[in-house]
Amino acid sequence: MEFSNLMWTIPFLGIIFSMSFLPLLCKNFWHKHGGYVPAFWTLIYLFFIAHIFGINKIFDAVVEPIFDHYIPFIILISSLYIVSGGIFIDFPRGNGALFNTCFLFFGSLVSGLIGTTGSATLFIRPLLRSNTNRKYKTHLLVFFIFLIANIGGISTPLGDPPLFIGFLEGIDFFWFIKNLYRYQLATTVFLCLIFFIIDHQLLKYDVLPQTKKNDEEHIIFRGRRNLVLIFGILAAVILCNFDGYFTLFGEKFSYASLIRNTILLIIAIISFKITPHTIRERNSFSFEPIKEIVTLFASIFITVTPIIAMLHQGTNGSLKFIFDWIAPNNEIIASRCFWASGLLSSILDNAPTFLIFFHMLSGNAIELMTIKANLLSAISISTVFMGAITYIGNAPNLMVKSISANYGVKAPSFIGYMVWSIGILIPVFFIISCFL
């Protein structure tokens, strides 16, 4: 199937705009039937696939994105969610702006080691628990997504999928931390400072009574064995990347993906078996957050296919205006590359977006690490950092939103969150782009 008409972007954009505006315009409808809206747009997309390419192409339109990308994505997210849900962390004395700021700073550093998804699912619960007495918590979720679910992942290929793609393409494992630490440190410190000011000011208006603190002086840590399982998940993701394919239903499937997915499912089952039920109860663990991710991203992965295909076509595709803007007169401008790759990553899957721009810039890892290092820096920072602009920019964003709802903490709407992200992050990104 060849997608050459921009009309193919309508179903995906329909999902995005529905998530943005329906909760505001039709609150009751969205609350009761919002889960069916992405499915509605997916059916429209598949209808036109059948109408234009033939009904037999519906199978291809569903099977390829589901098996190649969606299932591995969901298995990874679900296994991390299940394993992290078996870890209970509590801070008896955790309270106040300084504690919260240090917590976010530390969590963002850990994200580079265990990944933004693992770090986000591990730390969101203890942060919410340590602030149960707070009346205003929206800013906690927003800055948590900024720092731990996104920006913290810039330091190593383990931190975020785009960097791992770069590592597989030949970028040195330590290149990112060596070349990008200044951007990470400056951005993290600045956002932590902004957070501290906001949190400190809001404390003056928090009128909820203090909850009784645990009498124990030390940090409570339960479910340590699950921490080992998290590193097992990371090891499986890193090591199960090798060539080799088998054919099923006329489609090629990777042996590495099959083995990795099997290992992750086994780890999730082991976590359930070895974790005392009381730990998951104390974490308010349920499968509701993962259900939202499963249903929404099924539609996103299917309907985003034409847009990714158009981007792969480069200057020969319908989205050539993007590439013409990046490289007027065939000379690539790093700042424009930064904005184009980043803004696309905020609504698309950031891993394929990084890969597309990686090959557009040259595709040669040695060249990009040396004479074109500013261009590699631009797409690395943008695809990781700008995942924080929207809820769908990075999977952990929606995970944090859903887990928070389980704790009775109302997260901002899709548009409400973007008001925060645009107001705070866009000026920061503008400054970054000036130094590339």
Image: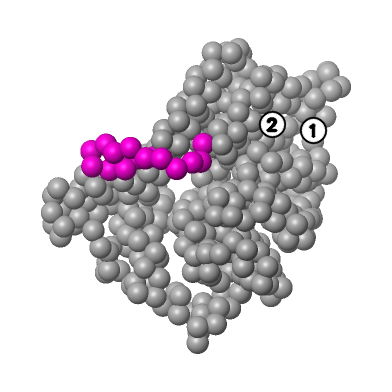
Magenta-highlighted residues:
240-254
Residue 3 image position (x, y, % from top left): 27, 64
Res 120 quadrant in image: top right
Residue 415 colored magenta?
no
In the picture, the quarter occupied by the N terminus is bottom left
Compared with 40, 226 (above or below) is: above
Mark with earlier residue (2, 1)? 1
Compared with 388, 240 (above or below) is: above
Residue 266 image position (x, y, % from top left): 49, 22
| Three-letter code, disc 1 | Gly
Foreground of the two, 204 or 88: 88
| Three-letter code, disc 2 | Pro
Res 380 quadrant in image: bottom right
Q: Which residue is mark 1?
A: 94
Residue at 49% across, 59% down: 355
Foreground of the two, 95 or 295: 295
Residue 244 colored magenta?
yes
Q: Residues within 10 Å of mark 2 (few under 14, many from 20)?
A: some
Direction from residue 21 to residue 52 in the image, left or right:
left
Res 368 quadrant in image: bottom right
Residue 214 image position (x, y, % from top left): 79, 20
Q: CA distance from mark 2 to mark 1?
A: 9 Å
Element marked by disc 1: loop
Direction from residue 408 to residue 106 in the image, left or right:
right
Residue at 81% across, 40% down: 99
Q: Which residue is mark 2?
A: 126
Residue at 79% across, 36% down: 95
Residue at 51% across, 80% down: 327
Contact check, label 2 and label 1, Cβ < 8 Å: yes
Compared with 22, 7 (above or below) is: below
Direction from residue 75 to residue 34 in the image, left or right:
left
